[in-house]
Image (spheres, grey):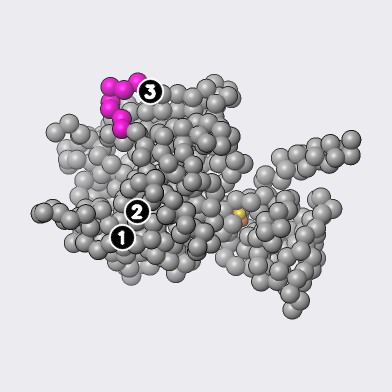
Amino acid sequence: MPLHCKVTLDNYRESFDCRTGESLLRGMERLGHKGIPVGCRNGGCGVCKVRVTRGEYEVGKMSRDHVSEDEQNQGVVLACRCHPRGDLQLQVLGHLTRIIEKSHSFNKQNANN
Amino acid sequence: MALTGVLRPGFIQLRVLDMKEALVHYRDRIGLDVVSEEADGRVYLKAYDEFDRHSVILREADKAGIDYVGFKVRTEEELDGFDAALRDYGLHTEHVPADEQPGLGRRVSFEIPSGHRLDLYTEIEMSENGPMVQNPDVWHEEPRGMRAIRFDHCLLYGPNVAENIKIFTEILGFSLTEYAEGPDGGKLAVFLSCSNKAHDIAFVEYPEKGKFHHASFLLESWNDVGHAADIMTRYDISVDIGPTRHGITRGRTIYFFDPSGNRNEVFALDYHYYPDNPTRHWDADQTGKSIFYYERQLNDRFLTVVT
Ligand code: FES
Ligand SMILES: [Fe+2]
């Protein structure tokens, strides 16, 4: 397994480096990145929900309130409980997403001005 | 005796995803003592300064959140009175027989309009390890971890908070001590007391039923809040916010998460409430300050992250 891997967020065309073995969410937070909403960081609240569209990973315990078995089989995970084994590509699904996408595009617009 | 009817929140049953991790958190970090582990898998705990047998029950499940919160009532007559009054009001009550939890008497159980289950009871065994009563030292053994004194209150999220207020104030004898107004002029966050405390339970209006925001543990001092923060960093506990202060209740506080994502709070030094005190309130444009007095704004997590 590589020590580092690249995590790409489809929603924002953004990426960050993550250590294999640490959770996606932790990797994101450690480097001061944004994009996946951060809640409890422990698999209970569901705000960090993402769909992995490419790549391999392992998952820890996740509250079934937020990820059903079916969803899990289709690559839906909680980013705080998802440990990449290599480069990953994701789509952010959590319910804060819209707010963040909005403010993100707002910031981008400002940056472009 | 001045304090009658409902005396205090006595216990809370929480769901955890992994019991082993949960015990490290609640026992070793927060500092609760394990009272018993039962055949059905539930683990019973208490804080060092509580007289009753247990106050926190952990149940391993595949989802996080709250099962129920229990309030201790002073007499059997009052318990029956509440049962009748709740039924008259149109709520469905159930009777949970004694010993469904070890050491606990019969319970009157019902669901409130926000979708949470509440239990009332009068009898629970005294702990063998409760505070001393004769020439009482401050503790038997020096408290562990964050040195939690007691389970103090919980904050629950759900719809129909206005109806909850009615049931708590008109039937169960609570006072509305403080509230924060929402953008629509309604009550967004409400704080209710059955005692001399600034709050014994609180609710925030939220579309989904039965959600859990936090269970709170009392600490002795602002220094102990700092000590708890040191423990959180040392053991890499997920912190939501703090140390800071609430405008509402004025408590010095930290919000953090257990290993299953359930929010906990440790706090110290909120104000005392008397039933003749007026209800305090915060205008909608002061919500940030009302919840996080030092930051003066809410974090995204306060209104959205629940289990
Ligand atoms: S942040 Fe709560 S489930 Fe991931
Ligand atoms: Fe609280």
- The answer as to whether the residues below labels 2 and 3 share one chain is yes
Which chain contains the residue that carries disc 2?
B
User: SS at mark 1?
Assistant: loop
Give the amino acid type for the residue marked by disc 2 in the picture. Ala
User: SS at mark 3?
Assistant: loop
- Magenta stretch? B272-278
Q: What percent of the width, then of the height, locates residue B26? A: 40, 60
Give the amino acid type for the residue marked by disc 1 in the picture. Pro
- The residue located at (46%, 39%) in the rendering is B245
Residue placed furthest toward the bottom: A1
- Mark 1 or mark 3: whose residue is earlier in sequence: 1
The answer to whether residue B34 of the structure is visible from this angle is yes
- The residue located at (65%, 60%) in the rendering is A26
Give the amino acid type for the residue marked by disc 3 in the picture. Thr
Residue B3 among those drawn in magenta: no
Q: What percent of the width, then of the height, locates residue B271? A: 34, 33
- The answer as to whether the residues below labels 2 and 1 share one chain is yes
Q: What percent of the width, then of the height, locates residue B174? A: 31, 31
Residue placed furthest toward the right: A113
Overall secondary structure of the magenta section: loop
Q: Which residue is mark 3?
A: B279
Q: Which residue is mark 1?
A: B143
Q: Which residue is mark 2?
A: B148
Disc 1 crowd rating (10 Å Cα; few below 14, some 14-19, many 20+) is some
Question: Within the image, what quadrant is residue B136 found in?
Answer: bottom left
User: SS at mark 2?
Assistant: loop
Disc 2 crowd rating (10 Å Cα; few below 14, some 14-19, many 20+) is many
Q: Say if B147 sits above or below B117 in the image.
A: below
Q: Nearer the viewer, residue B300 or B304?
A: B300
Q: Which of pointers 1 and 3 indicates the residue nearer the eye? A: 1
